[in-house]
Structure formats: C-alpha cells, structure tokens
Amino acid sequence: MEPYEKQLKETIDRYRSLALCKVHFHKLEGRLKESYTRKEQLGQLLEKEYKNIEKLQKLSLRSLFYRFLKDKDAQLEIERQEYLQAALQYKECVAAIESMEFERTVLLEKLEEEETLTKKLDDLLVQREAFLQRTHPEIRKELLSLAQDMDHKQGLKRELYEVLISGKRAEQTMTKVKRKLNEVMQWGEWVQEQHPYWLDSSAKKHPTIDEVQQLIYKLRQELELFQDELEDIFKFGNFPYASKYNGLQHFADIYIDNLLTDWVVHRKITDTLQVVHSQQSNLMRLLASLQNESKQCDRAMSYLDEKKRELLMNYIGHQ
C-alpha cells in the first residue's frame, strides 16, 4: 500500500462524516424553525387555558348553572386537565428546542473544517490517480473501478454503523419507557375518572412522572435521528426492508405527541405499552436486517481486497 493510501481512507471517512453533519445540520435548522413557531403557539394556548381556570373559579354557582348547566367542580376539573395537557406539551417543546440548539452548536464547530478537509481529500485523490496511471497503465481502469467499488462499500459500511448505533439507542430507550410505564401501573388503585390520580399532590411529586416525560422527549429525538440516518443509506442502493419502516417516523411525529399526556390516564397506559412494544419489535427486526447488510458489506470488501491483490499479482507475474 502506498504511504498516502491509509491517509486517504481516513480522510474519506472524515469527509463523509462531515457531509452527514451538514445534511443533519440543515434538517435541524428546519426543525428548530418549526419548534420556535410551535413554542409560541403552545405558550398562547397555555395562557388561554390558565385564564379559563381563573375565570371559572371566580364564577358564582348560580352564574355557572345558567352558563354551562354543569356542576362547577366537574367543569373546573375539565379545565384543569386541558391546562395540564397544554403545560406538558409546552414543557416538551422547550426541552426539545434546548437540545436542538446545543446540537446545532456542536455541528457548527465540526463544519468549520469543511474547506480544509475538502482540499486535503482532493489532493490525495490526485495522488492515487497519478500513481495508478504511472505504475499500472495497462490495468489502471480496472484498479480505479475496484477503488471506486471499495470506497462505495466503505461508505455504506460507515452509514450502516451509524444507523445501527442510533437504532439501538432508540430501542434501549423504548425498553426504559416500557419499564417506567409498568412502574406507573403499580402505584396502586386509581380513583374514578372525574378525579384522576395525577391531581393528588403526592402523585404530582412522584419522580416517575418526570422520568417518563424525559424518556419520551429523548425517544422522539432518537427516532428522528434514526430515520434521518436510515434515509442516508438509500444513496448506496435499494434496500426494500428499510423503506417499509417509515412508520417509525410517524410514531415519533404523531403518537408521541399524544403519549405525552395519555400516559397519565390509567385506562390508556395498557394501550400505550402495546404500541411501544409493537414499534420496538418493528425496530428490532429492522436492526437485524441492517446488521445482516453490514456483514454482507464486510464480505464484499474482503472480496474486493482479494480481487485487487490478485489483479496486481497477476500483472506483476507477466512482467
């Protein structure tokens, strides 16, 4: 191997990693913009729900009867539930924004080396081309083709490694969510629907509530990252088994919004657990397919290495 080849492979890996950072940075910018808008909307909703509670508390029973024809306590309970839902969504949005802003700062620091790294890569590629044309003019086309195939497989291998890491991370978080939800179900007997358990002061302080919330925030971001990295492997070829799992993104975008508030209602925890378990099973099947693809990639790289070696040996043998 020529002295520059090792450096070239390392530079290609760094360049591809940087390219992924750039793509992710642009996607992150879009999500931040949407989150800022959502935060403003949720803030307005939260203020509205709080004012509704204040207004209802000030009404006399006579006025309430003529306006709503309902019991004041029951109506107040409904308003409090709506306020809780708005508060949970607002808190989740703020936490997500803070996390994305931190991630954006990290990505910007990495992207600072883009110009320098690109120039280094171009210089090394020129060296490779010159070496092949100078020393192996008869077989340079074959060698270049093999080098391109190897670069392709190395890129795919790196993408598979990244997507497997992010997928396993999300799968582990799903396991934690299920465990915490099972803990919630063991708190004891729940009271009737018109007096949900979360209104009890001791339940509000229960540490599992905050733990589940934080895990849900984390799961959303991990599934979004997993979906982004899953899409990156499609540029290396057609992977039908991967294209079927866009439902994971749907789960992150739609279901988790409801999960943030539904999990505190006892009758919905069982449904929540079933959905998380189903999505976790889908994710594990996909990860198994990706692991198999990674092994096939390793075999293909070994084959290309051997083919290049044989090509050079045969060529030298004819000198």
Image (cartoon, grey):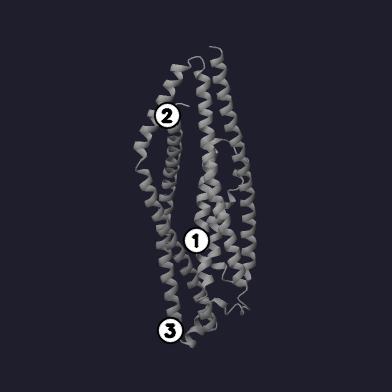
- Residue position marked by numbered label 2 in the rendering: 4
Which mark is in front, 3 or 1? 1
Mark 3 secondary-structure assignment: helix
Residue 69 shows up from this direction: no
| Vertical position of residue 29 compared to residue 272: above or below | above
Mark 1 secondary-structure assignment: helix
Q: Look at 53% across and 50% down and name the residue there.
A: 166
Q: Nearer the viewer, residue 299 or 62?
A: 299
Which mark is in front, 1 or 2? 2
* 1 and 2 marks in contact (CB < 8 Å): no
- Residue position marked by numbered label 3 in the rendering: 58
Mark 2 secondary-structure assignment: helix
Which mark is in front, 3 or 2? 2
- Residue position marked by numbered label 1 in the rendering: 217
The answer for how far apart the CA atoms under marks 3 and 2 are is 79 Å
Q: Nearer the viewer, residue 45 or 227?
A: 227
| Vertical position of residue 253 compared to residue 297: above or below | below
Q: Look at 38% across and 45% down and name the residue there.
A: 110
Task: Indicate the position of residue 64 as horizontal and vertical percent values.
Answer: 49, 83
Which numbered dot is residue 315? Answer: none
Q: Earlier in the sequence, mark 1 or mark 2?
A: 2
Q: Earlier in the sequence, mark 3 or mark 2?
A: 2
Amino acid identity at mark 3: Lys
Q: Look at 40% across and 29% down and name the residue there.
A: 124
Answer left or right for 222 relative to 121: right
Answer left or right for 45 relative to 285: left
